[in-house]
Image (cartoon, rainbow, N blue to C red):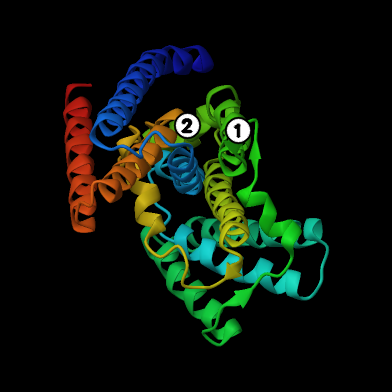
Amino acid sequence: MTDVTTKSRLLPQSRLNFLFGLTLLALLLLLWVVLGFATQSFWTGNNISNLLRQGSMIAILAIGQTFVIITGGIDLSVGAIVGFTSVIVSLFLQWNLPIPVAVILTLLIGVGIGLFHGFGIVRMGLPPFIITLATLTSLRGIGLLITNGATISITNDTFTAFSRANFLGIPSLFWMVILVAVPAYILLNHSRWGRYLFAVGSNAEAARLSGVNVRRIIYMAYVLSALFASFVGLLLAARIGIGNATQAEGWELQAIASSVIGGTSLFGAVGSVHGPLLGAFILATINNGANLLNVNSFWQRIITGGLIIVIVYFDQLRRRRS
């Protein structure tokens, strides 16, 4: 009976997510059309490839961030995790570890960071904002301490060549988005864990009384967020060929912005996978177009901030009417 009720409540929300996704897609296509007329270089192969590469890593971060936000939490550490894991994989490669081993060990470190966040929230009772903010600061410091403030060059051409390659004319980094998004979509929309995730975000106490293991759901959400961030750290290290703890500074805010623009509610219990993807590429398109039009970079931030205000405002109106 409970599962039937839960499904009936999720159906209208699924329709709203679908319609909102179509709106975002229309906005993205409109931006591409406008920029195609406004600039001569927007539709060139090199520019489209660069745009896809720029948006791909933020898109993956935004998916992980969405899992956390649906629970009513927040993860401020993802940018620091990206920078830290770029250092870690660079060290592993410098020590001549095989690429698969270096990749797996780096991802396991990401899982460990996510487990630490879950422990801090579930066992220690710390607010997600505080524990992830502490991790953000600590990982930057640890990364700088390990490297003595220097960058670590990656000389393994096999590792770096991947990020610059194309498959079927599409950058490999964009294929990594698909690799992450498909299982994430299935997990969120077609699994019991996904239903429980929304239930925890809606009312954690009611979910607990219904038999949901709330602690496990929270652990999983933060583990996935950190895992995706460590994956992005690998991609960034491969793309630029260095490891540096200060890389990806501010990316946590871009990930949150992409998720929110994509329709994820900061109040929890509302979110999708396609929304944050579209949000990330909308932001990437705005930044790309502003650069092509020689618009002051400060305007890019103002536009992003304005979008967030509008989306959150309409989200509040929706909640008041529901």
Residue 110 pos. (x, y %) = 62, 59
User: Which is more toward the observer, 53 or 261?
Assistant: 53
Mark positioned earlier in the residue sequence (1 or 2): 1
Q: Residues within 10 Å of mark 2 (few under 14, many from 20)?
A: many
Residue 183 pos. (x, y %) = 62, 31
Q: Residue 26 bears which disc, if any?
A: none
Against 246, residue 104 (above or below) is above
User: Which is more toward the observer, 105 or 277?
Assistant: 277
Q: Residue at x 62, y 41 (%)?
A: 172
Q: Amino acid at mark 1?
A: Gly
The residue singled out by tag 1 in the image is 169
Depth check, mark 1 against mark 2: the one in front is 1
Q: Are marks 1 and 2 in contact (CB under 8 Å)?
A: no
Q: Is residue 265 visible?
A: no
Quarter location, residue 111: bottom right
Furthest-front residue in view? 40
Secondary structure state at the residue bearing disc 1: loop
Q: Amino acid at mark 2?
A: Val
Cα separation, mark 1 vs mark 2, equals: 24 Å
Secondary structure state at the residue bearing disc 2: loop
Against 267, residue 183 (above or below) is above
Residue 188 pos. (x, y %) = 53, 29
Q: Residues within 10 Å of mark 1 (few under 14, many from 20)?
A: few
Quarter location, residue 151: bottom right
Residue 57 pos. (x, y %) = 50, 48
Against 124, residue 7 (above or below) is above
The residue singled out by tag 2 in the image is 273
Count numbered badges in the picture: 2
- Image quadrant where one finds the C terminus: top left
The reply, left or right, for residue 176 in relation to residue 31 is right
